[in-house]
């Protein structure tokens, strides 16, 4: 009987500590993950804006060695750069809070969002095989999110 | 059509991206263990942002050559490339589950590239 009582005391003492650990995990670990997922949404917007700008003829044509810079002189590209900078700011805010391999792996979410955005906005085709690949990526991202303790 | 020169630009862009991320992480340190301080930290940020700018211009050039979703398929190796770089240069401990997750992502991106 005394043994059962001891066990009960042990359990009651341990439970708040376990709950505390769990709530600390939620607050500390999920906030940077949220930052990175927001970063990927912004990066997707930026990629679509850059693509729309890149396929349009440039307003200013520069000579051959630096001709690639002429793509910068386009409203869509400039807007894309602004959104990229916002995305980069979130990335820099999240970086000290997570190991780089976890943060970068989670940012692979952009590989799911960009094909979806390409399909929705640019009307690019997504074959079934590519969708299977996207599911693999999703599995990897979920696994990676729960791999960090 | 993928040519040898376009493939070289893709590889160069991925190396620039991985190097820039390592520099930025080195500059920002972590909440528990800040690494560099003062001008050294600013220098790491500057190198990281310069490398990222190099990646950006290469990427912008590649966008003219490939469809956007096809271009992203080439990024398949980058989670593995970066995990190796983190282990080598930042001494991050990468768990077996994290390696497996990175492989899943790489396989997924390769599948995306094949179709």
Image: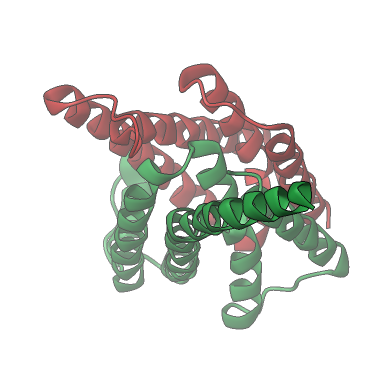
Chain colours: A green, B red
Q: Position of residue A12 (x, y in %)?
A: 61, 57
Q: Quadrant of the C terminus of chain B?
A: bottom right
The residue sitting at the top extreme is: B88
On screen, residue A147 versus residue B89, left or right, reads right
Asked whether residue B45 is in view, the answer is yes
The residue sitting at the left extreme is: B38
Q: Position of residue B58 (x, y in %)?
A: 45, 42
- The vertical placement of B100 against A61, above or below, is above
- The answer to which quarter of the image holds residue A89 is bottom left
Residue drawn 76% across and 71% down? A126
- The vertical placement of A109 against A62, above or below, is below
Residue drawn 79% across and 56% down? A136
On screen, residue A102 versus residue A38, left or right, reads right
Q: Position of residue A141 (x, y in %)?
A: 66, 54
Residue drawn 80% across and 45% down? B107
Q: Nearer the viewer, residue A108 or A78?
A: A108
Q: Nearer the viewer, residue B71 or A42?
A: A42
Asked whether residue A64 is in view, the answer is no
Q: Position of residue B55 (x, y in %)?
A: 43, 40
Q: Nearer the viewer, residue A8 or A118?
A: A8
- The answer to which quarter of the image holds residue A110 is bottom right
On screen, residue B8 versus residue B97, left or right, reads left
Count of residue discs: 0
């Amino acid at each position: 009987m005394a043994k059962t009582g001891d066990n009960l005391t042990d359990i009651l003492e341990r439970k708040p500590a376990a709950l505390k650990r769990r709530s600390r995990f939620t607050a500390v670990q999920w906030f940077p993950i949220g930052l990175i997922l927001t970063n990927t949404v912004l990066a997707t917007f930026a990629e679509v804006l850059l693509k729309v700008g890149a396929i349009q003829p440039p307003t200013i044509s520069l000579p051959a060695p630096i001709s690639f810079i002429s793509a910068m002189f386009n409203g869509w590209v400039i807007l894309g750069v602004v959104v990229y900078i916002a995305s980069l700011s979130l990335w820099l805010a999240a970086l000290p809070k997570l190991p780089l391999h976890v943060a970068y792996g989670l940012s692979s979410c952009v590989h799911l969002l960009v094909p979806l955005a390409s399909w929705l906005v640019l009307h690019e085709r997504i074959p079934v095989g590519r969708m299977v690949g996207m599911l693999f990526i999703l599995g990897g991202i979920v696994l990676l999110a729960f791999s960090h303790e | 059509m993928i040519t040898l020169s376009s493939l070289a630009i893709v590889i160069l862009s991925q190396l620039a991206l991985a190097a820039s991320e390592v520099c930025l992480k080195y500059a920002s340190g972590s909440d528990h263990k800040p690494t560099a301080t003062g001008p050294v930290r600013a220098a790491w940020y500057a190198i990281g942002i310069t490398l990222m700018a190099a990646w950006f211009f290469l990427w912008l050039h590649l966008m003219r050559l490939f469809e956007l979703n096809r271009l992203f398929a080439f990024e398949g190796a980058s989670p593995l490339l970066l995990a190796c770089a983190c282990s080598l240069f930042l001494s991050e401990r990468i768990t077996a589950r994290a390696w497996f997750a990175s492989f899943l992502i790489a396989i997924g991106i390769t599948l995306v590239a094949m179709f």
